[in-house]
Image (tube, grey):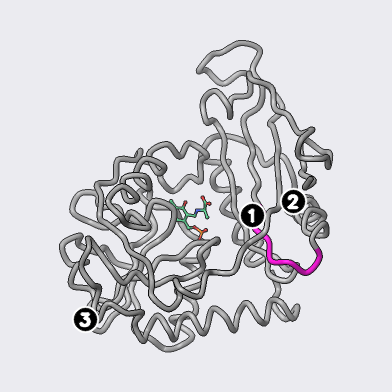
Amino acid sequence: MPRVYLNGEFMDQTHACVPVMDRGFLFGDAVYEVIPAYGGHLLQLGAHLSRLEASLAAIRMQNPLTHDAWRQVLETLLAESPGQDQLLYLQVTRGVMPRRQHAIPNDIPPTVFAQSSPLPPVPPALLKKGISAVVLDDIRWARCDIKATTLLANILLKEEARRQGADEAILRRDGRITEGAACNVFAVLGDEIVTPPKGRDLLPGITRDLVLELVCDAGLPCREAPIAADRLAGAEEIWITSSSREVLPVTQLDHAPVGSGEPGPLWQQVRAGFERRVDRLRRGEETP
Ligand code: PDD
């Protein structure tokens, strides 16, 4: 049974319990992070911990651990599966309240949880054929920049995509693309790679930033700018990015081919850059 971290202790997952009065359980009053690790090395840990800091500040919570303490917790969990690619999950809830009340109680200690699970390699078939997506109205709240555990809208959007026979939902708000139900979005429009700018309507994805860096390093033309939803169908390429799916091509949008209907040349270039980065990390040549 995998070991997890809960409130200062490492324990068997079956022994890790959270009281029913936890505000994370009753209200989704909690934030989280998902961090990939390749060959025992955490990818972009500093950026993930900075985003955690921002999510906590946005919900008026203190960070319960220092960055060094977080690193120690995550590296202890990683050490359980030496050398394996892992996905680290961490969550901070506002804690356990004496009775159910919306108002935030004073001085309750947060609940702090972390676990590590295997990060399976992206299936070769997806890299070869790409994934499908449908565009759906973004029904989420107005603070999608906070990495909150309250993911019901994302779950319903993902399920609607599945019902429509697609792998992912790409979301539209006020005529513009925001992001995916669990990923950020890039589009190749004309001769430019475009991704929506950061703001309250999308999560500032860590993989998004990494891909922007790779695109820049490769000298490709790139812009953070709004994407009109009605331009997406005419994109030469569409990509999604996330910590668990890395950077994947979307080759079908709303049941029609994107560009040639195959993963595009710019995606191939960026994917190769991503793989080189991960290889360097595995060899311990990257500072996290
Ligand atoms: N989700 N946007 C949303 C809504 C997300 O849920 C995610 C990631 C991203 C990509 O962010 P990053 O590159 O930092 O992983 C964008 C994670 C993987 C999850 O909830 O499991």
Check contact, mark 2 vs mark 1: CB within 8 A.
yes
Q: Where does the N terminus fall, quadrant-wise?
A: top right
Compared across the picture, whether 17 is left or right of 159 comes to right
Residue placed at 54% from the left, 61% from the top?
A: 244
Crowd class of label 2 (few under 14; some 14 to 19; many from 20; radius 10 Å): some
Find disc 1 in the rendering and name its residue: 49
Q: Secondary structure at mark 1?
A: helix
Q: Earlier in the sequence, mark 3 or mark 1?
A: 1
Please tell me which residue lies in front, 87 or 90. Answer: 87
Residue placed at 77% from the left, 58% from the top?
A: 78
Q: Earlier in the sequence, mark 2 or mark 1?
A: 1
Q: Secondary structure at mark 3?
A: loop
Crowd class of label 3 (few under 14; some 14 to 19; many from 20; radius 10 Å): few
Q: Amino acid at mark 1?
A: Leu
Q: Which residues are magenta?
A: 82-88
Compared across the picture, whether 244 is left or right of 165 comes to right
Find disc 2 in the rendering and name its residue: 70
Q: Quadrant of residue 186?
A: bottom left
Q: Earlier in the sequence, mark 3 or mark 2?
A: 2
Q: CA distance from mark 2 to mark 1?
A: 8 Å
Find disc 3 in the rendering and name its residue: 190
- 273 is higher (above) or lower (below) than 77: below
Q: CA distance from mark 3 to mark 2?
A: 43 Å
x then y, percent, for residue 214: 49, 80
